Amino acid sequence: MTIKKTSLNKLHQNYKAKFVEFAGYEMPIQYTKGIIEEHKFTRTNAGIFDVSHMGQLFIYGENELTIELEKIFPLDLKNLKINRSKYSFLMNDDAGIFDDLIITKIEGGYLIILNAACKDKDFEILSKILNNKFKIKLDNERSLIAIQGPRSVEILNSITPEVNKLKFMTGGWFDYQNRKLFVTRSGYTGEDGFEISVLNDLVENFTRNLIDSGAELIGLGARDTLRLEAGLCLYGHELDLNKTPIEANLKWAISKERLSNGGFLGSDKIIKQIQVAPKKIRVGIKPEGRLIAREKSKLFNESNLPIGEITSGTFGPSVNGPIAMGYIDKDFSKANTKILVEVRGKKYPANICGLPFYKKSYVKGATYE
Amino acid sequence: MSEVKFSKEHEWITLEEDVATIGITKHATEMLGDIVFAELPDKGSNVEKDGTAGVVESTKAASDVYTPISGEVVDTNQSIVDDPAKINEDPEGAAWFFKLKIKDISELDTLMNREEYDKFAKETSS
């Protein structure tokens, strides 16, 4: 299988990216400054992320489509206004997670942003359920760029006026050099920022313009430390087919209006788990000292009995210490519970801790329609 | 002090009488990226040539540190445990890892000199 490249591959090379293969794509893991500096730059200034490997799925239809999508997603889509976004999941009948996603209601349909590793399978699943009744397109002609950090609003607004009117989890079409960009105020770093869907032939020009305005390219390495500090889940780590949104502590993403009647994929299991809490739950974990506990590290209680496993673990540059997330027996899930984590055959002290590790700074209050 | 020698596992070693000082190379730190954790062998313990004698972790991954020579650990550099970023700053100087009282100087014979190592590092990283 040939490795795919995004439209910005040459630009990444120009900026001396180190590449890794991720979900079948050659992606920049870091540039010359390194992960820690790139992470800190995003928290204090504005970082640009090429996330064009992610899927941009457009589904076109009116009320009938909304009714069909409500049979899939745990969302109150009927009452979702145009240009509003929601975080959600594609689940199986047992509430196992195929993918986590952002769905935005747009004029004439929906735009769904999917994980790169899941997008083809998601397309297959959704096409099958929707049974050719609606036009559905996984758009390969568009790139996806995120700009994240406190200066992103000022920088993006200088080349795409009016985006400063957007609030967190809203979006809209904006003009850039007489072409159309779809911009949402969202992202996955815990910072204020935007994701911009831009045509492939325009993306390099657009990205260079952001760089010339003061933003810097940031690799996937820092994207991972940023999202982990923000307590955000990564598919394939915190989320997969063996975990449900309730176990993942993501009940907030399930619409209350939909819980009374169910009727979405996995609803029976979700409703059952809300009534009787599941045995395991996702938590934040801080190893004591500087020890890093990575994915698959086993967790134990103080009597040495196994109680869980780490799903992501790294060093948090802004926290300035090791951080992790994992699944643990619910009896040990309270903040400040002392546990042990096994690293290289030895057990070390760690503490359960509330999420996020680093306070989010979203610009809330959806007023833009 | 003796000429600095290098191992294929990207450690450097210098010798002063029968005490060797060991660290990781600049090339190794460039491959690892930002180092955020270091673990050293216990003072007084014995380590065997090519055996593990420590761990370094970057934001991305953990890597074992091997010893290019056998001996007893007589000193360790606590400052790199307290501030692992020092390893990126001065890997072949202030950020040494541990000192060994060596047993068999002939174990150094298989190691590379600077020129050989630079060539090896270039070939293996491309």
Image (tube, rainbow, N blue to C red):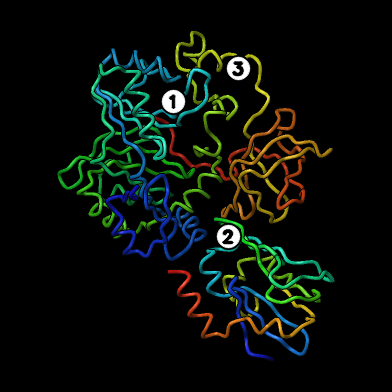
* Residue A361 in the image, given as x and y percentages of width and height: 49, 42
Mark 1 vs mark 3: give the one in front.
1
Report which residue position mark 1 lands on: A90
* Residue A116 in the image, given as x and y percentages of width and height: 39, 40
The amino acid type, in three-letter code, at marker 3 is Ile
Tag 3–tag 2 contact (CB < 8 Å):
no
Left of A196 or right of it: where is A255? right
Q: Residue at x 54, y 43 (%)?
A: A230
Q: In the picture shown, does residue A40 fall above or below A239?
A: below
Q: Nearer the viewer, residue A104 or A25?
A: A25
Chain ID, mark 3: A
Label 3 secondary element: helix
Left of A252 or right of it: where is A56? left
Q: In the picture shown, does residue A133 fall above or below A107?
A: above
Label 1 secondary element: strand
Q: In the picture shown, does residue B23 fall above or below A212?
A: below
Q: Residue furthest top?
A: A261
Q: Nearer the viewer, residue B123 or B30?
A: B123
Q: Residue at x 68, y 70 (%)?
A: B50
The amino acid type, in three-letter code, at marker 2 is Ser
Report which residue position mark 2 lands on: B58
Q: Nearer the viewer, residue A115 or A146?
A: A115
Report which residue position mark 3 lands on: A274
| CA neighbours of label 2 inside 10 A, class few (<14), some (14 to 19), many (20+) | many
Label 2 secondary element: strand
Cα separation between marks 1 and 3: 18 Å
